[in-house]
């Protein structure tokens, strides 16, 4: 049991961003990091910025009391983001100064340079981006990553030793689980997709989904109004800010959660191999087995390991796959998903990685 820290206690510090700065999955990730870190006895401090220097007394207290800091945790890339911005070097130097005085951990939620390159957004990666990221990783004692692929990518970029990494396996999702009840497994089989629904990200991949009287598709998220124009088998439910409402609705409505994406970008394929995505975790918390495209190779490994869904090579296989599953097999997958979701809902993987890093 960890004791609650007082606001004046700077022995354990989490540097992160305010959740309200973001929407959707990123906001939930930040809320989760704050909650799980507080449960481990850490005090969250908003990332440093000259724009809020007059409103950041915690930073002044922290810098004045560096001798009291025992453990520093950095939520990356929500703090010290390396892409083109005017404050990154100052923020990096402050973090390096603190990390020299204490034991430091960086929890890598994402690799922003690889993300920027993979999604081909307007280029905000410059020559300084790699320098900032390199110096940041080099200054930290332990680096929490999801898997070997993410570790190897960081090592390929910066040559960091194996013993500085801790593998946490998957991204937690700290939303309360709805109650699970037995669900009749019969047609029409209802499949949900939750997330950013922009045409660019999906690559109009929904056009390749099989259509039939035995299948229904339900979409939750932003930028999805265009989906409703396809046919009666595609249902757009809009964007709901409360993730518990989404999880509860999906849990009661659907048989499966769907993971798919644009198949025509190999850089994105590599990028998606570094982590599990919040969709995976949201489906698990909902108690929904997953239908996952094989290009999500890491998630596919987890689906097989934990027996929480089905892997398809082509969307054309989806109907045959779901129809081949018996009710008993489905209930086993559903129970496995719900049990894994219980761990994700309580921060099991983050807390286990932190305990390993802190040698507890």
Image (spheres, grey):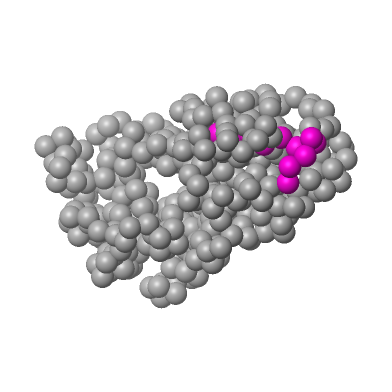
- Location of residue 282 by image quarter: top right
Residue 286 at x, y percent in the picture: 64, 33
Relative to residue 181, is residue 290 depicted above or below?
A: below
Answer left or right for 117 relative to 168: left
Residue 125 seen in render: yes
Q: Give the camera-side residue of 264 and 211.
A: 211
Q: How many marks?
A: 0
Q: Residue at x 74, y 52 (%)?
A: 316
Answer left or right for 208 relative to 200: right
Q: Give the camera-side residue of 296 and 227.
A: 227
Relative to residue 201, is residue 17 depicted above or below?
A: above
- Location of residue 188 by image quarter: top right
- Location of residue 129 by image quarter: bottom left
Relative to residue 93, is residue 279 depicted above or below?
A: above
Residue 359 seen in render: no
Q: Residue at x 87, y 37 (%)?
A: 328
Read off the magenta span: 210-221
Q: Is residue 25 magenta?
A: no
Residue 230 at x, y percent in the picture: 61, 38
Q: Give the camera-side residue of 106 and 319.
A: 319
Q: Residue at x 61, y 26 (%)?
A: 248
Residue 331 at x, y percent in the picture: 81, 36
Residue 320 at x, y percent in the picture: 82, 48
Q: Give the camera-side residue of 119 and 168.
A: 119
Q: Residue at x 82, y 28 (%)?
A: 184
């Amino acid at each position: 049991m960890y004791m609650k820290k007082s606001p004046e206690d700077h022995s354990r510090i989490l540097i992160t961003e305010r959740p309200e700065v973001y929407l959707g999955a990123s906001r939930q990730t930040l809320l989760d990091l704050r909650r799980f870190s507080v449960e481990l006895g850490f005090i969250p401090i908003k990332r440093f910025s000259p724009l809020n220097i007059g409103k950041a007394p915690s930073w002044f207290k922290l810098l004045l009391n560096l001798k009291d800091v025992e453990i520093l945790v950095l939520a990356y890339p929500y703090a010290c983001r390396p892409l083109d911005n005017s404050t990154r070097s100052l923020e990096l130097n402050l973090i390096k100064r603190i990390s020299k005085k204490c034991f430091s951990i960086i929890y890598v939620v994402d690799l922003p340079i690889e993300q920027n390159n993979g999604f081909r957004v307007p280029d905000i990666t410059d020559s300084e981006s790699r320098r900032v990221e390199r110096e940041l990783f080099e200054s930290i004692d332990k680096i929490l990553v999801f898997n070997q692929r993410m570790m190897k990518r960081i090592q390929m970029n910066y040559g960091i030793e194996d013993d500085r990494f801790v593998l946490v396996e998957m991204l937690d999702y700290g939303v309360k689980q709805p109650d699970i009840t037995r669900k009749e497994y019969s047609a029409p089989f209802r499949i949900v997709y939750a997330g950013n629904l922009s045409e660019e990200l999906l690559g109009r991949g929904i056009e390749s989904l099989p259509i039939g009287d035995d299948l229904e598709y339900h979409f939750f998220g932003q930028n999805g109004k265009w989906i409703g124009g396809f046919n009666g088998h595609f249902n757009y439910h809009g964007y709901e800010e409360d993730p518990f409402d989404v999880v509860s609705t999906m849990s009661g409505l659907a048989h499966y959660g769907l993971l798919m994406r644009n198949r025509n970008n190999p850089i994105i394929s590599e990028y998606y191999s570094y982590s599990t995505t919040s969709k995976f975790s949201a489906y698990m918390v909902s108690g929904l087995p997953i239908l996952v495209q094989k290009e999500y190779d890491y998630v596919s490994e987890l689906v097989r390991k934990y027996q929480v869904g089905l892997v398809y090579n082509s969307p054309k296989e989806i109907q045959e796959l779901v129809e081949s599953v018996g009710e008993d097999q489905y209930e086993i997958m559903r129970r496995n998903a719900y049990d894994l979701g219980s761990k994700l809902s309580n921060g099991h993987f983050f807390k286990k990685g932190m305990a390993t890093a802190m040698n507890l």
